[in-house]
Amino acid sequence: MRPPFGIYLHVPFCTVRCGYCDFNTYTATELGPVGGAKGASVATFVDAAILELDLAHRSVPGAPPVSTIFVGGGTPTLLPPQDLVRFVDAVRERWGLADDVEVTTEANPDSVTQESLRTLAEGGFTRVSIGMQSAVPQVLATLDRTHDPANVARALAAARAAGLSVSLDLIYGTPGESLEQWRTSLETAIALEPDHLSAYALTVEDGTKMAARVRRGELPMPTGDDEADKYELADELLAAAGYDWYEISNWARTGADRCRHNEAYWRSHDWWGVGPGAHSHVDGARWWNLKHPATWAKGLAEDHPEAEREELTLEQRADEEILLGVRLREGLSTDLLGAEGRRAVAGLVADGLVDGRAAIRGSVVLTRRGRLLADTVVHQLIAGEPDPVVVSDA
């Protein structure tokens, strides 16, 4: 039997580029003239995306009905809601949708209205993931986020009224953010009672506006200890509010509130990524599309939007199963480890990185401390030897 099959759509358009962002996104100014390439503009994008669905349908014969659709970006809700619904309809026409299909779009708080969210819900969307990032205006300004913090609550209420499940995305470790400011963001998010919450540590990526500001001394570089303190605070407050972690950076009220599309990534299921720069994984092959919207659109017109591809070896697939599976609450069966990895488990338990009771039952489950040092755990499970990184009390 084939594994579950998902569809990801990457919408590369943004109104403003945030200073920390290194995603494959473009403002109208950055796009410049696109030479009439169909798909390189907001107005024509979904038409081109549906052409890629045709390519996917020809390329993956026998795929089961689609289990999950995730629309990310960028700011997907810059597209007209009718276009997003048209994309979902096109997926349904080609593969059919599972009875319990999960259909998610990301959204900025200022990019949705009651009417647009109602259109999405009536068109088959089931979830919306709102980019809250922070509740503190000073922190949002450092991130170059332009939304009004009050609009997070308005957007969430409108989504709920439309019958959509709601997730909030937060970022911690912004340069200059205090622990108390992070607490304010967490408490504000929890008070809104979303179904799901994600919290990601900020990474200052080379080539971004934020990296340049850090290099000039205008902003302090986030430290590992600071981010560890903020992760621990998040886990404590969320657990107290009834949210269970199910992946290192994700918490949900119930098992039904988990993001099943992201779980498919961590479980190495099959998915086709549509759009510029989108990544796909089917039958042990992985590939990614041409990055620039105009280049992708022109490649798609020739039935070849792909930039590069790699066939995973059995060893690579085994290593990735460890790398991804260990992130999950259910843990990783020790049967999937090599002899060296199985021997390493006892030391990881002794270091407080892996739950001892779960290990006795044959599963590698990270403790909270282990979640903070997941890379160390993975290294030992794969290599069977201690990571050269010093394990601290953080």
Image (cartoon, helix red, strand yellow):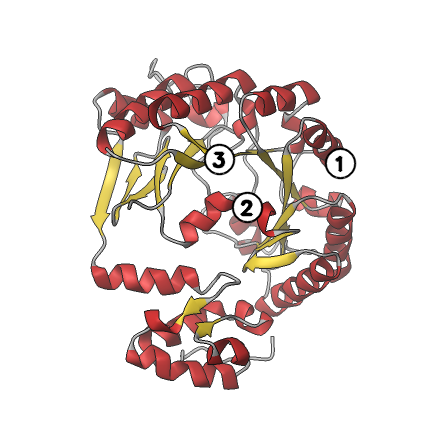
Residue 199, percent from left and from top = 61, 53
4 versus 162 height, above or below: below
Q: Mark 3 sits on what residue? A: 101
Residue 29, percent from left and from top = 49, 24
Q: Mark 1 sits on what residue? A: 153
For marks 1 and 3, the one nearer the N-term is 3
- Position of 171 compared to 14: left or right? right
Query: As shown in the figure, which amino acid type bears the numbered disc 3?
Result: Val
For marks 2 and 3, the one nearer the N-term is 2
Number of the label disc, if any, that sits on residue 93: none
Q: How many labels does the image show?
A: 3
Query: As shown in the figure, which amino acid type bears the numbered disc 2?
Result: Tyr
Q: Mark 2 sits on what residue? A: 20
Helix, strand or loop for disc 3: strand
Helix, strand or loop for disc 1: helix
- Position of 368 compared to 287: left or right? right
Residue 345, percent from left and from top = 42, 80
Q: At x 56% / y 58%, what residue is drawn?
A: 246
Answer yes or no: do the residues labelled 2 and 1 have beta carbons within 8 Å?
no
Q: Is the C terminus in the top left, top right, bottom left or bottom right quadrant?
A: bottom right
Q: At x 50% / y 82%, what residue is drawn?
A: 349
Is residue 353 in view? no
Q: Which image quadrant is residue 305 in?
A: top left
Q: At x 64% / y 58%, what residue is drawn?
A: 244
Crowd rating for badge 3 (residues with CA inside 10 Å; few <14, some 14–19, many 20+): some
Q: Name the front one of labels 2 and 3.
A: 3
Helix, strand or loop for disc 2: loop
Q: Name the front one of labels 1 and 3.
A: 3
33 versus 8 height, above or below: above
Answer yes or no: do the residues labelled 1 and 3 have beta carbons within 8 Å?
no
Residue 38, percent from left and from top = 35, 16
Task: Work out whether residue 337 or residue 287 is closer to the camera in this orientation and state it.
Answer: 337
